[in-house]
Image (spheres, rainbow, N blue to C red):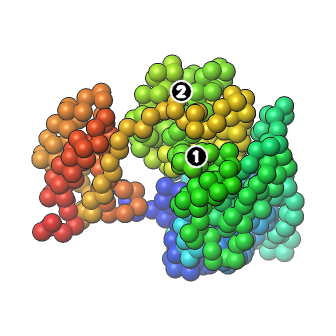
Amino acid sequence: MKGNGERRERLFGTDGIRGVANIEPMTAETALRVGRALAYVFRHRPGRHKILIGKDTRLSGYMLETALASGICSMGVDVLLVGPVPTPGIAFLTRSMRADAGVVISASHNPFQDNGVKVFSREGFKLPDEVEDEIESLVLDQTIDHLRPTATAIGKAFRVDDALGRYNVFVKNAFPRHLTLEGLNVVIDCAHGAAYKVAPEVLEELGARVTARGVDPDGENINRDCGALYPQHVQRLVRETGAQIGVALDGDADRVILVDETGEVIDGDVVMAIAASEMLRTGTLRQEVLVGTVMSNLGLEVALRRLGGRLLRAPVGDRYVVEEMLRGGYNLGGEQSGHVVFLDVNTTGDGLVTLLALLAIMLERQRPLSELKKVMQHYPQVLINVKVRERRDLATIDAVARTMRRVEHALGEKGRLLVRFSGTEPLVRVMVEGEDERVVRAYGEEVAEVVRKHLGADPAS
């Protein structure tokens, strides 16, 4: 597979706008203009309009929330402030409360000094590129600067006090009513993030005994040595407490990393393999297709094929996974990173919904996670990042194209080569999979070296 060509820089990246808080583009000034642009774009129908705003637990969330709300109100649109709520909760609440759009102020798994803005449509889906482009152009030019509603036409802001309770009920309704978590020991790390309160509550209300960490946010400790990026803490606690499952969420709780009862980490590919296997068994996997990404392990594809299903690959990014699911009418998809989308339940990746789905399978099948995960065997995968000085179509560089063709031919159907430009950094990412890790690594180094020779940031390297 060939790398991407040039792409113009955009305010919106693969998952909204993101950067260091109080430095462009994550400043109060830009947030205000984003709010005005959102209000303009989503005023589709007659009457009053409303946009919902939620956030995670970062200190800078207060600043950006106020600026966004001010911009939205200045365009005559009302604001619903729901406070710290997981990203999937914002997707749900936007639909449930019939808002015109939903905004999440979060930088997901990034450190606390970063922040970001993600936007959901009234249907609860992340915005397509063309809508983001429209918003971006309105932020950067002066097209709507003259639009200034006055008097009673100015928007109002309302605080929604029961938002977290609504999401709690929504998540619990995704768990089969004939099942209970009574007698189950669960360890959960909430990363001091948006799910610090709701995640332990949901599990306890369903009957589980919960050992929780990462539930004391102070505005600065989100994702700090905790959560999905540091599952070793959950691994340790699972072994110490004898828990049946461990859970590590990221800062906005839209993805989850699981730990089985032996203390071994289970990534998103294995979670999807377990879920797809159960849905194939019960006839609920639409068209017998699972949507992954170009980075999904080859072992997932092999497992699906053995079970009578099929893996369809989308570009990296849960937004593109969902777009492919909608296009083909599929109901399960996700990423290796732990974003898993059960489209019959929610419109985006939801860490708690994913956790409850796996717990339900464990209970229905009466099998521990360590046995369920055997449905898939990982193929050795090597990822090498090469810093480059420019973006060029790799197919036009003879030596690179020739090496890639030779490696692809050598791997055949028992391996896979993917070479692509990073969407956010000056990097070429070389990924090789195959049956033998030593061979896979050698092929990866070979391709990386030829890319480095022709495009490397340091010509001497």
Q: Quadrant of the C terminus?
A: bottom left
Q: Is residue 99 left or right of residue 392?
A: right
The 10 Å Cα crowd at callout 1, few under 14, some 14 to 19, many 20 or more, is some
Q: What x and y, as percent, mark residue 159?
A: 84, 67
> Residue 437 versus residue 413: which sits nearer the camera?
437
25 versus 449 height, above or below: below
Q: Disc 2 marks which residue?
A: 289
Q: Disc 1 marks which residue?
A: 262
Q: What x and y, as percent, mark residue 106?
A: 62, 65
Lower sequence index among marks 1 and 2: 1
441 versus 43 height, above or below: above
Tag 1: amino acid: Thr
Q: Is residue 198 left or right of residue 372?
A: right
Q: What x and y, as percent, mark residue 32?
A: 64, 74
| CA distance for labels 1 and 2 | 30 Å
Quarter of the view holding residue 390: bottom left
Q: Residue at x 35, y 41 (%)?
A: 380
Quarter of the view holding residue 33: bottom right
> Residue 249 versus residue 448: which sits nearer the camera?
249
Q: Residue at x 30, y 54 (%)?
A: 384
Q: Is residue 107 left or right of residue 414?
A: right
391 versus 402 height, above or below: below
Mark 2: which secondary structure?
A: strand
Q: Is residue 202 left or right of residue 255?
A: right
Q: Residue at x 36, y 56 (%)?
A: 422
The 10 Å Cα crowd at callout 2, few under 14, some 14 to 19, many 20 or more, is many
Tag 2: amino acid: Val
